[in-house]
């Protein structure tokens, strides 16, 4: 429980600050930092837009009956590599790998169960504000760690761009490079056919001359914009763009990953090898069931196809990273804007539920246990080890060696990096 702060405490703190005396962290926060700082170098964040139903995937419960409106799971449960931890029958490839995975079953937020607000919450860790634009977790990791290689961007989004994925007050330098098609690199980095290497070099020399003769950017925002231009020029060369040539991978490996979503996951592994720090992979292929993960009404009838596709791609990604000695260095995160309730709607599908749902962590050097947190008999209420979104973000930060207790600054305004979240200590301490 957090201690309350009185007006006298605030006045005393102000006096100390005015006198030039820095306020120390609490002793408990200071002592916990070294023991909970992980060694992961990269994050692959898999976004299941629409709302993955925890009761139908990583937190299965007793079987329900949509025809008779009996609340419960849509599928049977199967055992996993971790005793007493089960998953849905359509996660058959993930089941034997759950000793490398923790399904955090007790995530919750207080947002209205509406997609845009909840998506923002699950990317920035905060409610929408009218006074400040908060950075996404991808931009936070990019800001704190940067790219692991000079010819790589720190943050790549494989999916459609959106303000919730953006840098907020951190500025353009910590934004993302995005692409929507794995068959080629980002369109903005592909030169038109008429631009030969010599012509590109002349253009770059001319730009350099203009910048040298011009006044230095007085505003940080303009300086960040210039830095983004320089990075884009660096990334448009052949050395970085080879990462998008998936044909270099063995045919059998590409087949194991599966369709377009699987190819996105394969590309994410190649981006990790190239030095990208944070990659978000969107699973927004609605044509599989006509609704994506937002399974109201008849959308639930083909939900198993989405689950199977995720199962195939993510299990292959885990094994691929492990084979290349990258799994402990790469934290895989699976998130969604909320979960689904155990009750069935009039069409046999499910509504939205933000008060109890599941997010998943894999690899990253964590002390995995198959599952963390517990919900009731219908996965409707949390009964142990609740994990707020700031706590989940603090766990990600700690895993990649970021001080989750520090402040970022929106101008002169201090902003806690994770809205005062606390990591799940038992996943970080053996």
Image (cartoon, helix red, strand yellow):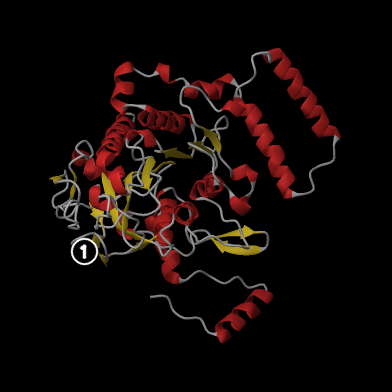
Residue topped by disc 1: 376
> Residue 327 or 156: which is nearer the viewer?
156
Q: Is residue 314 above or below residue 371?
A: above
Q: Is residue 399 above or below residue 426?
A: above
Determine crowd level at label 1: few under 14, some 14-19, many 20+ residues with C-alpha closer than 10 A.
Answer: few
**In-image side of 267 versus 323 (left or right):** right
Q: What quarter of the picture does the C terminus occupy? A: bottom left
Q: Is residue 275 above or below residue 88?
A: above
Instruction: Give the image location of residue 289, x and y in percent.
Output: 32, 37
> Residue 119 or 388: which is nearer the viewer?
119
> Residue 50 or 59: which is nearer the viewer?
50
Please tell me which residue is depicted at 38% across the width and 37% down the height of the picture: 286
- Marker count (numbered): 1
Residue 398 visible in image: yes
**In-image side of 221 versus 252 (left or right):** right
Give the secondary structure at mark 1: loop
**In-image side of 265 versus 307 (left or right):** right
Instruction: Give the image location of residue 195, x and y in percent.
Output: 68, 15
Residue 369 visible in image: no
Instruction: Give the image location of residue 236, x and y in percent.
Output: 61, 25
Instruction: Give the image location of residue 146, x and y in percent.
Output: 55, 42
Task: Tell me which corner region of the image, top left, top right, bottom left or bottom right, holds residue 394.
Answer: bottom left
Q: Is residue 252 above or below residue 224?
A: above
């Amino acid at each position: 429980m957090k201690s309350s702060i009185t007006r006298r405490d605030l006045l005393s703190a102000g006096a100390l600050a005015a006198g030039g005396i820095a306020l120390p962290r609490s002793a408990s926060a200071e002592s916990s930092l070294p023991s909970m700082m992980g060694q992961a170098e990269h994050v692959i964040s898999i976004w299941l837009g629409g709302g993955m139903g925890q009761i139908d995937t990583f937190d299965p419960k007793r079987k329900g009956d949509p025809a008779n409106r009996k609340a419960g799971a849509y599928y049977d449960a199967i055992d996993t590599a971790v005793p007493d931890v089960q998953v849905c029958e359509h996660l058959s490839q993930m089941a034997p790998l759950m000793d490398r995975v923790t399904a955090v079953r007790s995530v919750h937020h207080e947002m209205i169960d509406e997609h845009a607000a909840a998506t923002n919450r699950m990317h920035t860790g905060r409610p929408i504000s009218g006074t400040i634009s908060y950075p996404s977790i991808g931009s936070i990791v990019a800001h704190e760690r940067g790219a692991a290689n000079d010819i790589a961007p720190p943050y790549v989004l494989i999916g459609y761009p959106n303000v919730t994925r953006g840098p907020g007050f951190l500025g353009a330098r910590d934004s993302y490079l995005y692409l929507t098609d794995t068959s080629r690199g980002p369109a903005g980095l592909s030169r038109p056919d008429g631009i030969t290497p010599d012509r590109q070099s002349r253009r770059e020399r001319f730009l350099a001359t203009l910048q040298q003769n011009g006044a230095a950017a007085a505003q940080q925002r303009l300086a960040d914009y210039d830095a983004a231009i320089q990075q884009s020029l660096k990334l448009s060369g052949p050395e970085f763009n080879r990462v998008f040539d998936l044909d270099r991978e063995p045919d059998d490996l590409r087949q194991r990953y599966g369709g377009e979503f699987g190819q996105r996951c394969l590309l994410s592994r190649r981006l990790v090898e190239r030095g990208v720090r944070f990659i978000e992979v969107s699973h927004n292929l609605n044509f599989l069931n006509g609704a994506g993960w937002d399974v109201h009404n008849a959308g639930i009838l083909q939900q198993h196809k989405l689950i199977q596709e995720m199962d195939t791609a993510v299990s292959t990604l885990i094994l691929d990273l492990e084979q290349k000695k990258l799994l402990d260095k790469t934290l895989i995160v699976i998130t969604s804007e909320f979960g689904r309730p155990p009750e069935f709607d009039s069409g046999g599908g499910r509504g939205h539920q933000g008060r109890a749902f599941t997010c998943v962590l894999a690899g990253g050097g964590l002390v995995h246990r198959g599952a963390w947190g517990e919900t009731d008999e219908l996965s409707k209420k949390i009964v142990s080890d609740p994990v707020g979104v700031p706590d989940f973000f603090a766990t990600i930060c700690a895993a990649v060696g970021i001080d989750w207790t520090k402040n970022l600054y929106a101008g002169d305004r201090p902003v806690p990096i994770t809205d005062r979240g606390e990591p799940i200590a038992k996943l970080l301490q053996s």
